């Protein structure tokens, strides 16, 4: 493992139902020092929005059991404490109407699956909140 | 288990050597084991004409394959997903055999 990677104390919520895809995301995040919370389905993640403080960023698969990623995104954007949390969507769906809907719901970024791990990490670093900036300004 | 050895009907152009970042070496055993389990799951589902399960499993494999560096897995899983989604089992057994053969023969080089 490289010892030249930047480390972080940020927390990322990974909402992903595919075991190995979730494992890969956790691996690349943790090797850079992120704390990772993992929810296997949309309902579990929605429960987190009602019971816990928001993470610094959410990686969200669109295709989930029990509650879709877009439905969860809507829930995040309507939960006051979570509404400014950056949400990076992961999806195999490249249809323009899906991307448009995701943008209208407040998605921060949209990454196609399969993904290159370094591509995901680049976006994570790009959209992580800056500690000296109010969250509502970071999305502008 | 079949007594007949698998037939390597993969295309000669199939990439059977895959280069993967050395950091990911600890993940590979579990990744390959789970893909082989998914082949079993899809074969069992196909035997029962449960094409929705075939489609779902193939969809997950399509995403995981390329993300771990195995673009060929993504391509083959996408074909299986597409066929199952169309509601036909024609050719699926052969596609699953081809994917299983690839998983048996692929060589991973950690760079």
Image: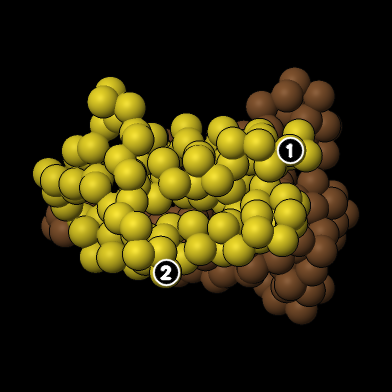
Chain colours: A brown, B yellow
Label 1 resides on the chain identified as: B
Q: Which residue is mark 2?
A: B1
Label 2 resides on the chain identified as: B
| Front: mark 1 or 2 | 2
**Residue B6 x %, y %:** 33, 51
The vertical placement of A94 against A85, above or below, is above
A73 or B76: nearer the eye?
Answer: B76
**Residue B88 circle label:** 1
**Residue B15 x %, y %:** 26, 31
Identify which residue is drawn at 75% across, 21% down.
A96
Q: Residue lying at the far bottom in this picture: please name it.
A: A51
Identify which residue is drawn at 65% across, 55% down.
B46
Quadrant of the rendering where the N terminus of chain A is positioned: bottom left
Q: Is residue A110 left or right of residue A62?
A: left
B68 or B6: nearer the eye?
Answer: B6
Residue A139: tell me if it is visible.
no
**Residue A77 x %, y %:** 81, 51
Q: Residue lying at the far front in this picture: please name it.
A: B3
**Residue B75 circle label:** none
The vertical placement of B89 against A71, above or below, is above
A20 or B83: nearer the eye?
Answer: B83
């Amino acid at each position: 493992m490289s010892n030249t990677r930047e480390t972080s104390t940020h927390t990322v919520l990974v909402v992903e139902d595919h075991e190995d895809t979730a494992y890969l995301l956790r691996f690349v995040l943790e090797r850079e020092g992120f704390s990772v919370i993992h929810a296997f389905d949309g309902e579990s993640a929605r429960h987190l929005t009602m019971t816990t403080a928001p993470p610094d960023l959410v990686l969200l698969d669109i295709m989930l059991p029990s509650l879709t990623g877009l439905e969860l995104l809507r829930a995040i954007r309507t939960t006051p404490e979570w509404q400014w949390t950056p949400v990076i969507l992961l999806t195999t769906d490249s249809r323009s109407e899906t991307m448009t809907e995701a943008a209208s719901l407040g998605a921060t970024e949209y990454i196609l699956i399969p993904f290159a791990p370094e591509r995901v990490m680049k976006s994570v670093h790009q959209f992580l909140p800056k500690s000296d900036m109010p969250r509502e300004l970071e999305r502008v | 288990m079949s007594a007949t050895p698998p037939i390597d009907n993969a295309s000669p152009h199939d990439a059977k050597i895959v280069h993967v970042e050395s950091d990911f070496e600890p993940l590979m055993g579990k990744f390959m084991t789970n893909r082989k389990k998914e082949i079993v799951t899809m074969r069992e589902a196909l035997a029962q004409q449960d094409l929705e399960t075939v489609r779902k499993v193939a969809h997950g494999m399509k995403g995981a394959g390329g993300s771990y560096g195995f673009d060929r897995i993504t391509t083959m899983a996408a074909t299986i997903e597409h066929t199952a989604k169309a509601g036909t089992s024609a050719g699926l057994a052969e596609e699953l055999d081809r994917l299983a053969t690839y998983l048996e023969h692929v060589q991973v080089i950690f760079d």
